[in-house]
Image (cartoon, helix red, strand yellow):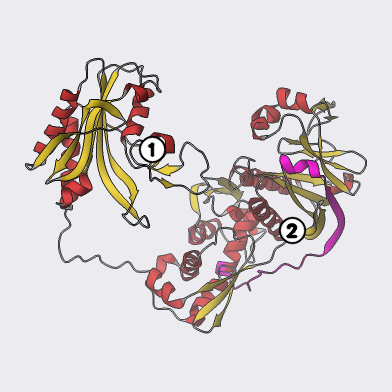
Amino acid sequence: MPVLTIRYDRLNSFLKKSLSSNQILELLPYVGLDIEDSNDEEVKIEYSPNRPDFGSPAGIAKALNYLNFEVEPKVEYDLPASDIYVNVDKSVEAIRPYILGLYAKLDFSESIIKEVISFQEDLHNGIGRKRRKFAIGLHDASKITAPIYYTTEDPSFKFIPLNGATPLSIEEILKDTEQGIHYANILSSRHIFPILKDSVNHVLSFPPIINGNITVLTERTKNLFVDVTATELSSAEDALALLATTFIDYGASVYKIKVVRPDKSFDSPILTPKKMQLRIDNVKRILGIPIGFNETINLLKKVNIRASKKGNHIEVFVPRYRTDILHEVDLIEEVGYGYGYNKITPLELRLPQQGKPLKTKEKINDVRLCLIGLGFIEIMNFYLSNKELQHPFSPSLIEIESPKTQEYNVLRYSIIPQLLQVLSSNIHEQYPQKIFEIGRTFELDKNGQNIVENIKVSAMISHSETTFTEIKSTTVSILDYLGLKNYKVNALSHEYFINGRCASIDNNSTYIGVLGEVSPLYISQSPLRNSVTALEINLTKLLSK
């Protein structure tokens, strides 16, 4: 969780009314902040990563002002245009395709520089995912000769990096500087690199690694240029909106710049508020308080959200810097902050009877205790698996649309292939190895339309002498432990198991599982060199009888 240390006098400089340290400490939790530590001069505040607008004293003071001092909501920002253009070269599309920016007039001081740079790094580490999604550059605009060019250079290109004394090539920066070593892995290309420079070839930055030294911020800086380069446009837009509104909170005049791409031109930043709808009955139901339209509208004002009644719902305009508000339930949470969660009286929980475990859960726990008693170790795998691993158990798998990795591209039908992977990763451990898992598996219904979830138990044994007899003994122990009588173990041919050493488990003529010696074909695809036996029982089918 991000932590911010703020002096009381610094926070008071942004507040509409000066507060004592005790008053500040009392009010901070009411806007959703945790106090980690405090003394007579300052307070250490921990804030949620989904509220990046709390990353500066100005942002926290803004929330306190709206909640306590009847400030009218400000959700729209009419930014004038500057004469700064950023020309984007086509070559950046393959490596870091997006750039946004702004121009601002602000009298910098030592404290403002420290706070802005701290805010910048919190954005990098939070919604920027350590600069993977975007990187922010802060520049003294008086040192820039417009227009600005966002282009690429080869590894031999040289410039003086931030706080450097001599020019270094891009290759040297990546190998020899702390920033280069730390962030080099983010770059998708090692042949061409993104560079931001002005019309006289002064380098502003080498994103996402390091800025140039020419445009460094000082206490004499009065004009600011901000660039945000990105691989994900929406995250960059969020970051720039947060920066723009934070600078405005500091008293800056913020201006739009023009970004000129090969295919289109557009202004940046865009601070249009988000339009949403809120149903009053949902507010009552979730918060559990009697509340009407007018009161809800007034409470939203206390968290800087403009609202008005439209028919049977409330029309809401959310300021652009509130990147955490995505759904109606987020708006309801804000109504709660405006109302005061400390004012909501908890209701006594009354149940008509005492709770007890479901019978199905008790039976599943019986299976778990049985296997642990037999010397098995319980493990847990993901519900997602690999299509090639799962194919021997079902040709009709439930595939993931646009999977992030091919390693996890289907919902698992069987747990057995994942147990084999676990054994393959533990060949250095002592044998025999006996593991099991009880978990959900997924398949399509008979019509192929709906997903059916089953709870299955799978167990696996690996050592040089494990046989069908051993895994059958384990199977019989489980079924006997459950008190099952009408089951049969019948010969079965299954491609994952050795022919003649595989069987089905049938209960009242219904197939509920499989056991056998795993085929050498699948063992040989792993580092394993011992025999492997396995069982799998569909507990959902078994316990529904």
Looking at the image, residue 303 sits to the left or right of residue 135; the answer is left
Residue plotted at (28% across, 33% down): 494
- Which residue is label 2 attached to? 269
Q: Residue 172 sits in which quadrant? A: top right
> Residue 288: horizontal and vertical position, in percent?
37, 72
Rounded to the nearest whole Å, what is the CA distance between mark 2 and mark 1? 49 Å
**Kind of residue sitting beneath label 1:** His
10 Å crowding of disc 1: few (<14), some (14-19), many (20+) = some
Residue plotted at (35% across, 35% down): 392
Residue plotted at (22% across, 48% down): 540
**Kind of residue sitting beneath label 2:** Pro
| Element at label 1 | loop
How many numbered circles are shown? 2
Position of 20 relative to 411 (above/below) = below
The reply to whether residue 105 is visible in this rendering is: no
Q: Is-magenta flag for residue 307? A: no
- Which residue is label 1 attached to? 391
> What residue span does the magenta drawing correspond to?
67-96
**315 or 245, nearer to the observer:** 315
Q: Nearer the viewer, mark 2 or mark 1?
A: 1
